[in-house]
Amino acid sequence: MNQFRFSRRPDIGDKVRVSFEFFPPKNDEMEARLWDTVTRLEPLQPKFVSVTYGAGGSTRERTARTIGRILKETSLTPAAHMTCVDAARHEVDAVIQEFTDMGVKRFVA
């Protein structure tokens, strides 16, 4: 297992912040690995973490479930990573509303 090392350079202080991007898990094994990774990265205090979103119902549901779990079980700030290609405006609006209703305040598009 890899060990993460993280240190701030004194000359940049808090001027540089990192974020991490996660992909919603497709099965139970991937979900366990994702949450192991989330747990290991959380102490690094990223500015936010994004969870990718793709067209199609199953990916949308997995993204929403992953973001919901991040909101409930971690101190991380999640961002919904939106894919708007081939989506009608009302579809994008509905997805944004769903995420804001969950408590998401950041979006990456």
Image (tube, grey):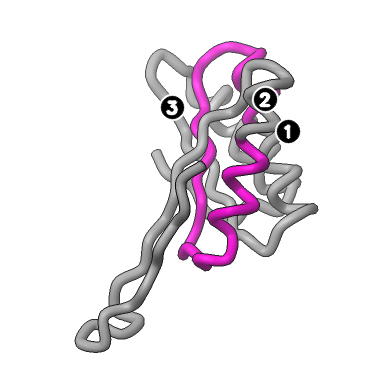
Whether residues under marks 2 and 1 lie with C-beta atoms below 8 angstroms apart, the answer is yes
Q: Amino acid at mark 2?
A: Arg
Q: Earlier in the sequence, mark 3 or mark 1?
A: 1
Q: CA distance from mark 2 to mark 1?
A: 5 Å
On residue 79, which mark appears? none
**Residue closest to the eye, 61 or 98:** 61
Q: Is residue 45 magenta?
A: yes
Q: Secondary structure at mark 3?
A: loop
Report which residue position mark 2 lands on. 62
Residue drawn at x 49%, y 47% is 107
Q: Magenta residues: mostly which secondary structure?
A: helix
Residue drawn at x 53%, y 38% is 51
Binning the other alpha carbons within 10 Å of mark 2 as few (below 14), some (14 to 19) or many (20 upward) gives many
Q: Amino acid at mark 1?
A: Arg
Q: Amino acid at mark 3?
A: Thr
The answer to which quarter of the image holds residue 7 is bottom left
Q: Is residue 41 magenta?
A: yes
Q: Secondary structure at mark 2?
A: helix
On residue 83, which mark appears? 3
Report which residue position mark 1 lands on. 65
In the displayed structure, 8 sits above or below 2; it is: below
Q: Which residues are magenta?
A: 34-63
